[in-house]
Amino acid sequence: MASWFIETLSAANLKPEQLDLTGRTAIEVRESAAALVPSRRFLVLGTPVYAGHPPKPVLDFLRGLAVQQDGSAAVVYATYGAVTCGSALKDVATLLGGKNVEVLAAAKLVSKHSLVLDPSRDLFPDRPATKEEGLVGELVERVKAWYSSPVSKKHPGEFRTPKLPPRSLLGRFVSRVVSTRFIPSPRHVASRCTGCGTCVDACSTRCLTLASGKVVARGEGCAKCYNCLRACPTHAWTSPFLAFFPRMYESSARKKVEETASAIFD
């Protein structure tokens, strides 16, 4: 999704600069936030959704941002695995508001679910796709309109879109009660580990380390993305959560499947 934003913004001559938090340690995330100077006028911020919320690196980055100058604005988007987007967009918008950044528009973009390991059981195994790419184009057009408006600082509301539909009961429950602390981190089974380091390379927050040829430590910042479990060629990572999750996912999805949509926050 970020690459689509980069390409579309570049085609519109807006010359974006990309900052990818994937693979950065907790310290590097905080340093990246501190390095963004308040003169930045516009941000496009994207996040995955885990248990209805952005992962910790995204929240740490937003909390570490300096308060921006008047006129700073943002478009935010979240990719989620079809059941619920939870409160992820609201979480991001609230933190940006505390940094004096106005959220002009927001989008939730359905995608393949990171915890559904069997593609045949996933509702959207090939998403994001054309529909999501089209929405990126619409949002970039709004960014261009905002930039070209002589009164953009005072009247961002001229470019508002319909609000997101009300969240499902599941979505409200997730946003109020559930968080990633209820999802267990994958467990390492040393007897199956060959020390190949594949999981270390796959870790989205670089919190795994190798010692004596085996994975022995998980540092600060595990996002519980399960990249290590999916990547391991010898199945040296496991989790009891995976036995329960597909049933919960499919049951919830049958009752309520949210889709790609855009909105604006008041």
Image (cartoon, rainbow, N blue to C red):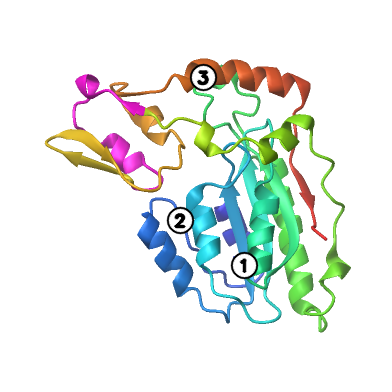
Instruction: Depth check: give the residue in front, 202 or 168.
Output: 168
Callout 1, which amino acid? Leu
Q: Quadrant of residue 112?
A: top right
Q: Residue furthest front?
A: 177
Q: Is residue 27 above or below residue 68?
A: above
Q: Residue furthest bottom?
A: 150
Residue at 47% across, 53% down: 57
Gap in angstroms between the C-alphas marked 2 and 1: 14 Å
| First to last magenta residue range | 187-206
- Residue 232 in percent (x, y) is at 32, 28
Residue topped by disc 3? 118
The mark found on residue 21 in the picture is: 2
Q: Residue furthest left?
A: 212
The first of marks 3 and 2 along the sequence is 2
Q: Is residue 36 above or below residue 195?
A: below
The mark found on residue 246 in the picture is: none
Residue topped by disc 1? 43
The question of residue 205 being in magenta is answered with yes
Query: Considering the numbered disc 2 on the image, is that residue within a helix, a strand or a loop?
Result: loop
- Badge 2 vs badge 1, beta-carbon distance below 8 Å: no
The first of marks 3 and 1 along the sequence is 1
Residue at 41% across, 35% down: 227
* 225 sits left or right of 136 in the view: left
Give the crowd class for mark 2: few <14, some 14-19, many >=20 residues within 10 Å: some
